[in-house]
Amino acid sequence: MFALARLLVIGFLVLSVVYICLSLYSRAVRRDKLEKEWDEEIQQGDRDAFVEAGLREYDGSLRRKLILGVYIVPLTVISVIIYLTNFH
Amino acid sequence: MGYIKWAFILTFWVLFASFLHYTLPQHDIARITETDVRRIDPGENRWFWAQADIGSDGTLGNRDVFFISTVRDNGRVMVYRNEDTGWSWPPYFKFDTSNLQAEAADLRSTAANPQWVVIKHYGWRNEFFTIFPNAISVRPVDGPDVRIIPWINIVILTTLAALFWAVWVRWRRFRIARIDPVLEDVEEGFESVGDGIARRRSGFRRWLDSWKSK
C-alpha cells in the first residue's frame, strides 16, 4: 500500500504543477486574444471591461474544463496498462 | 573546454539511452525449457531486482523469485526473472506474477517438439552482476519467424523526440532573443571599460599595498 500511496501523492503533486501552469498559460492566451480582438475590430467602449467579460465567459467554458484532462488522461492510461498487463 | 563539454553531452545521452534500453519493453522469441523458484538475496545488484510481491512483507532481506529459463531462436539461452513491478518504476503495473508463471509452465517444450513463444520483457541479463530481465507476458506463436512491430516503443520514442525537439527549439529561440544580445552588450562593455580597469587596478593595488607593513 505504501508504494500505491507514494505513486498517488507524487503523481498528484506533479500533475497539479502541470495543471496550474497550463491553466495560467491558457488564460493568458485567452486574454491576449481578447485584447487583440478589441484593438483590431471593436475599438469602442471600455477595453478592460470587454476583456474582463471575455475572461468571465472563458472561466465557465468547456475549454477550461478540458484542462482537467491533465489528471484524467494519466489515470486512464494507468488503468489501461493495468488491464492489458494483468487481465488481457 | 570543448572536449569537456562534449564529454558531458555524450555521457548524458549514453546514460539516457541506456535507461531507455533498460526500461522500454522488448520482445524475444524463445521456447521455454523450465520454470522454477530460487531464493534471492539482493546485494550490490539490488537496483536490478524489483520488490516483493504486492501485499507481502517487503522489508525482509531475501525472498523467493520465479524464474523462466528459455532457449532463444538464435540458439542461445536466456533466463528471465518474473517479479511484480507493482506501483513502482518501471510503470508496467504488473501484479500477475504467479499467473504468468503458470502460463509459462504451461508452454514448456523440448528441442524435439518446440512450442515457440514471444516473451515481452524489460531489463538486461548480465552475468557479472547476476541480473535478469523481468518477463512481462508470454504468448504462444506458430514459429520462430513471426514479425513483431514494437508499437509501444515507436509511440514512446516518437513522443520523446517531439518533446525534446519542442523544448530545444524554444530554448534556442529564447537564447537568440534574450541571452545573446546581453552577452554581446557585456562583451562590448568589457572592451570599452578594459583600459579603465587596468588603470583602476593599479590604484587598487596601491591601496592594498598601503595596508602592508613596511
Image (spheres, coloured by chain):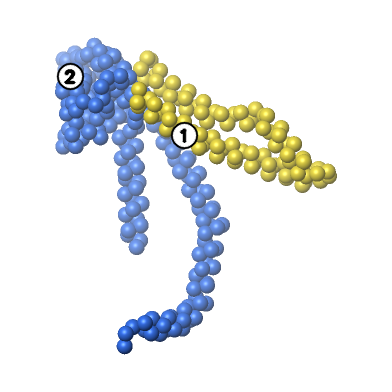
Residue placed furthest toward the top: B106
Q: Quadrant of the C terminus of chain A?
A: top left
Instruction: Say the numbered circle drawn on residue B105.
Output: none
Tell me what residue is drawn at x 50 percent, y 44 percent: B166
B141 or A86: nearer the viewer: A86
Name the residue tied to disc 2.
Answer: B37
Q: Residue at x 22, y 13 (%)?
A: B105
- Please state which amino acid type lies under the numbered disc 1: Leu
Q: Name the residue: 59% across, 29% down.
A: A66
> Which quarter of the figure is the N terminus of chain A placed in?
top left
Q: Is residue B209 left or right of residue B127?
A: right
The residue nearer to you, when weighing B60 against B45, is B60
The one nearer the camera, B55 or B85, is: B55
Amino acid type at image mark 2: Val
Above/below status of B201 relative to A80: below
Residue identifier under label 1: A13
Chain letter matching colour blue: B
Front: mark 2 or 1: 1
- Name chain A's colour: yellow
Under tag 1, what secondary structure? helix
